[in-house]
Image (cartoon, rainbow, N blue to C red):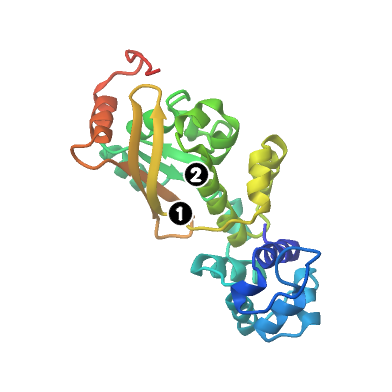
Amino acid sequence: MSNPSELGEFLRVRRAALQPEDVGLLNYGIRRVPGLRREELAMLAGVSSAYYTRLEQGLSNNASEAVIDAIARALNLTTVERAHLFNLARPGTITRRTLNRADKVRPGTLRLIESLAGTPAVVLGRRSEVLAWNRMGHRLVAGHLDFAAPRKPSTRPNLTRLLFLDHHTRELYSRWQEEAARAVSSLRLVAGRSTGDPELAALVGELTLNSHEFAALWARHPVDNCMSGVKYMHHPEVGDIELHFEVLALPDDSGHRVLMYAADPGTPAAEALQLLISCDAGHMVPVT
């Protein structure tokens, strides 16, 4: 997905978010547009205004590592945002051969999550598509869907699509806005690493057309590597539940990740998970 226009858009959004006083410059008079001017950012980065303008306009695709690093410093980018900028400026970290390969969960990964009977676990592809889940993972995040849905690409759920377009999933998250921002930040990071990924482009296009909330978040270019944190849920079977999550990236070039959930011992969330384990599907009375 990375291309010169993506690079230019990211630079413009980040430049507009900075005020002169944020970077030690004096602010003279009223500005017609928000944020720093191009020439101001170019000065901070130590490059010519004309060269920086070409970068924003997508007219230069051979910026040196030193120049990109200087621009990242001038924009006050985080470590994750800096890596994202490098990916946009120098696309190609994911090859077309990798993208075209059929995504299928490894048998060993499947055995691993199935052995975690008391831990909800979901195996995700690079675009947040569900490649597999154990019984608890399915019951926790998408019990209204067929357990076998991830087995075929044609029926495979996508957690980001569900979050924005599926009302059951939307109602699952007590802090939906927080969850939505996290999902878009992660997807932006993936987009910066991927070159020529038609499935990712199709997903972004579908969500942009069908969710104004996704479109607004996507336009802000948030970038974050959301590997751990807390999810706040209102589960239809066990009610409010606060769970820690960890995302473990598999050590190969597949881009697959294992998303796992856990509760602190002795908490209501731990009791809710135990209830979810012990109950039989179809015999629960939904919590209202």
Question: Is label 2 in a helix, a strand or a loop?
Answer: helix
Q: Quadrant of the C terminus?
A: top left
Q: Position of residue 56 (x, y in %)?
A: 76, 70
Q: Mark 1 belongs to which amino acid?
A: Cys
Question: Is label 1 in a helix, a strand or a loop?
Answer: loop
Residue corresponding to mark 2 = 178
Q: Residue at x 61, y 81 (%)?
A: 70
Nearer to the camera, 103 or 245 = 245
Q: Position of residue 255 (x, y in %)?
A: 49, 55
Residue at the farthest front position: 29
Rendered image: mark on residue 226: 1
Q: Quadrant of residue 243?
A: top left
Q: Quadrant of the N terminus?
A: bottom right
Q: Position of residue 225 (x, y in %)?
A: 48, 58
Q: In front: mark 2 or mark 1?
A: 2
In this picture, is 115 found above or below 89? Answer: above
In this picture, is 5 found above or below 107? Answer: below
Q: Residue at x 61, y 84 (%)?
A: 66
Q: Quadrant of residue 223?
A: bottom right
Query: In this orientation, does residue 199 appear?
Result: no
| In the image: residue 119, left or right of residue 36 | left
Q: Mark 2 belongs to which amino acid?
A: Glu
Mark 2: give few (<14), some (14-19) or many (20+) Cα within 10 Å: few
Q: Position of residue 238 (x, y in %)?
A: 33, 24
Query: In this orientation, does residue 114 appear?
Result: yes
Q: Quadrant of residue 86?
A: bottom right
Mark 1: give few (<14), some (14-19) or many (20+) Cα within 10 Å: some
| In the image: residue 154, left or right of residue 30 | left
Q: Residue at x 34, y 47 (%)?
A: 108
Q: Are marks 2 and 1 in contact (CB under 8 Å)?
A: no
Measure how far apart labels 2 and 1 are at the Cα level.
12 Å
